[in-house]
Amino acid sequence: MRIVIIIYRILLGLRYKVKLIGIEVLNGPNPKLFLPNHQATVDPQILFCNISKYTSVMPVVTETYFKIPLLKYVLNGIKAVPVSDLTAGSRDVDVLKKIQNNVVEALKNNKNVLLYPSGQTAEQGFERIKNKKSAWVVVSDIPENTDIIGVRISGLWGSNWSKAKTGKSPSFFKAYFKGILIVIANLIFLVPKRIVKIEFVNITKEAKEKSKHGKIEFNNSLEEFYNKNGEEKNNNVKYFWFIT
């Protein structure tokens, strides 16, 4: 599976030029809980592939994607943690408890975990966690030796994978196949690149402290971290090198 990840990272690199900041926090023996903002459907793919250059990580993924045979095979291969998708009308009332148990158990076993606090892609050029509880309940019960890594992603608002153009989540496969066609039309190596910046910051002390004061204060602190640079403008990057 490692070879597959490397190949996929190279393929993503045809369209996205990724700049990593703060990778030194990925070092060290402690298990790590990664908490990123969520600009577009593609950012988990970009983030996972780039974290995997330095350390292994288990992403928490809604079970909807596990129902697609090919994706199920890939997700099982990277040991993704499936959870019910409450936004899709799931009746699994114990989903939060399952997320908490699965993530905490993985961290206790010295595994790194990737969890999106908002649970959905952004509806505007900044992050809103609203009333979500998953990150808060996990951090409230986190093993003492865990490092909490805040991940600030920028550059994807306005992409084909974001809600910027229609206000709705794009179809995963439509966006995927559109991306393939764009790469082919640009003769593979001439694809205009979208610059994506990923910043890793150790927020362990602040996150643990804020979690003691309740969900609202904890979520507000994460939003402040993600939105530190203000609202991101709609970033349109041309699809074809031959169009100015």
Image (tube, grey):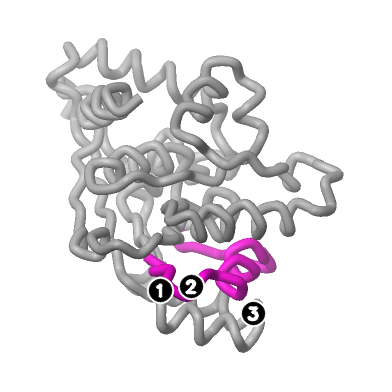
Q: Main secondary structure of the magenta part?
A: loop
Label 3: how many residues lie within 10 Å, few (<14), some (14-19) or many (20+)?
A: some
Residue that appears at 36% across and 61% down? 151
**Secondary element type, mark 2:** helix
Whole-percent x, y for residue 103 in the image: 57, 55
The answer to whether residue 137 is magenta is yes
- Give how far apart the Cα atoms at labels 2 and 3 are: 10 Å
Q: Which residue is mark 1?
A: 225
Label of residue 216 in the image: 3
The span from disc 1 to disc 2 (Cα, nearest Å) is 5 Å
Amino acid type assigned to the residue bearing label 1 in the image? Phe
Q: Earlier in the sequence, mark 2 or mark 3?
A: 3
User: Is residue 86 rendered to the left or right of residue 149?
Assistant: right
**Amino acid beneath label 3:** Ile
Position of 155 with respect to 115 (left or right) is left
Secondary structure type for disc 3? helix
Disc 2 crowd rating (10 Å Cα; few below 14, some 14-19, many 20+) is: many
Badges 3 and 1: C-beta atoms under 8 Å apart?
A: no
The one of 65 and 5 positioned closer to us in this rendering: 5
Q: Position of residue 49 (x, y in %)?
A: 31, 38
Would residue 135 be found to the left or right of residue 161 on screen? right
Q: Give the residue at x 40% y 73%.
A: 225
Q: For mark 2, what is the residue?
A: 222
Disc on res. 66? none
Query: Where are the magenta residues, as a range?
Result: 125-149
Q: Earlier in the sequence, mark 3 or mark 1?
A: 3
Query: What amino acid is at disc 2?
Result: Leu
Tags 1 and 2 touching, CB below 8 Å = yes
